[in-house]
Image (tube, grey):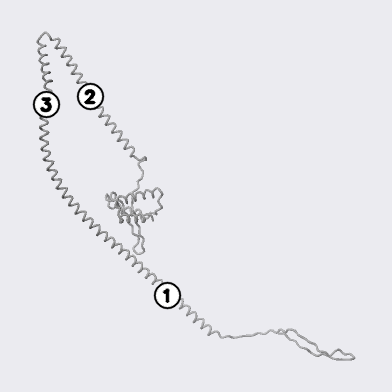
Amino acid sequence: MPYHGSIIVDYPASKTGGSRSVSYSGTAYEEVVVDIDVDTTPFDASVANCNDHVSGLTASVGAMNLAQCAAIKSNAEKVSKSIIDGFLHTVRAALSTQKAELEQKVETRLLLLRQQAASLKEKQEKMAADYARTTARYQKIFSDLNNELSIRIHEIDQPVFNAAKDIDEQSDRMLHTDMVQTAVTMSRETSILQAQINAATVKRHALEAMNQAKNFLVSKATSERTIQESFIDGSGEDGYLVPVCYMRTDSGKEGTKQKCVMPDYYSHKDRNLEEQLCQSLKDVDFAHASKTEDEQLKSYVQTEIAQRITGDDSHSERVRTMINKMFNR
């Protein structure tokens, strides 16, 4: 600690003698050891109490958080269930309405078709009776025409028959007279003419046979060319894509569900083919399809949509739009 003060001192011995005041100051240092005993029992008790309250508050906050999360989840499930139920009810009601309308239209069309079928059957029976009467009438006319034509043809050919008969009689007369040479010459000429006629007939038949052979060869070449153009170049091991719909649903409680759907012209041959396909695809890691496969699949889907949904009404258009929207996700 600092200190200061003054003191009166005597001068040194002299003739006159005297005293004076001398000031002094400085700082004094002293080491002091202080022992303090503090009782912390109440403070420790308050700290422990505070820790208990903080722990209780933490547990309360955790329980409140869990309760809040459970309440939010429950409310969300209720809201989603209400929304889904409402949507499904709306869709079910719309489908029921459309079904009723379509059933009414179908019944109307069926009634109209039944009436038209009865009318067509009546017209068919009437036309059959008319056809029978007309056939009988024209059959008699054609029979009379055939008889008349037969008589006229015989009349037209009668001079030829008479000429042949006269020639035969003349030949017989020549054979019994001195004109045998003439008869022989006429017979020779007649045989030559007959041979030429027979040769012409054979040539005509040969030409017809050649034309038929040519037509057969042309048809065969055309068929072979068509078959060749229809063939696909390859070693016989080329693969063809078959459209198959494979669905897999993973749920925690019920496990994994899977289903395969393929065209009827494949599945009707073997009813277990879909189950076998599902088992073979169970552990397959599906990669993204190539661009070519994607284009082929889109082309096939559009073709199926065009064949299955042919209407131009708003319902058909909405169905086509929804299918394309789900397919392009």
Residue located beneath label 3 in the image: 152
Q: Secondary structure at mark 3?
A: helix
Write the residue at 33% across / 63% down.
254
Instruction: Tell which circle, 1 or 2, labels the residue nearer the N-terminal end.
Output: 1
Q: Secondary structure at mark 1?
A: helix
User: On the picture, is 27 further left or further right than 52?
Assistant: right
Instruction: Report the front residue among 141 and 92.
Output: 141
Instruction: Tell which circle, 3 or 2, labels the residue nearer the N-terminal end.
Output: 3
> Amino acid type of disc 1?
Met
Which quarter of the image is occupied by the C terminus? Answer: bottom left
Residue located beneath label 2 in the image: 204
Viewer-side label of 1, 2: 2
Q: Residue furthest right?
A: 15
Residue located beneath label 1 in the image: 64
User: On the picture, is 168 further left or further right than 247?
Assistant: left
Q: Residues within 10 Å of mark 1 (few under 14, many from 20)?
A: few
Write the residue at 78% across / 89% down.
6
Q: Secondary structure at mark 2?
A: helix
Q: CA distance from mark 1 to mark 2?
A: 112 Å
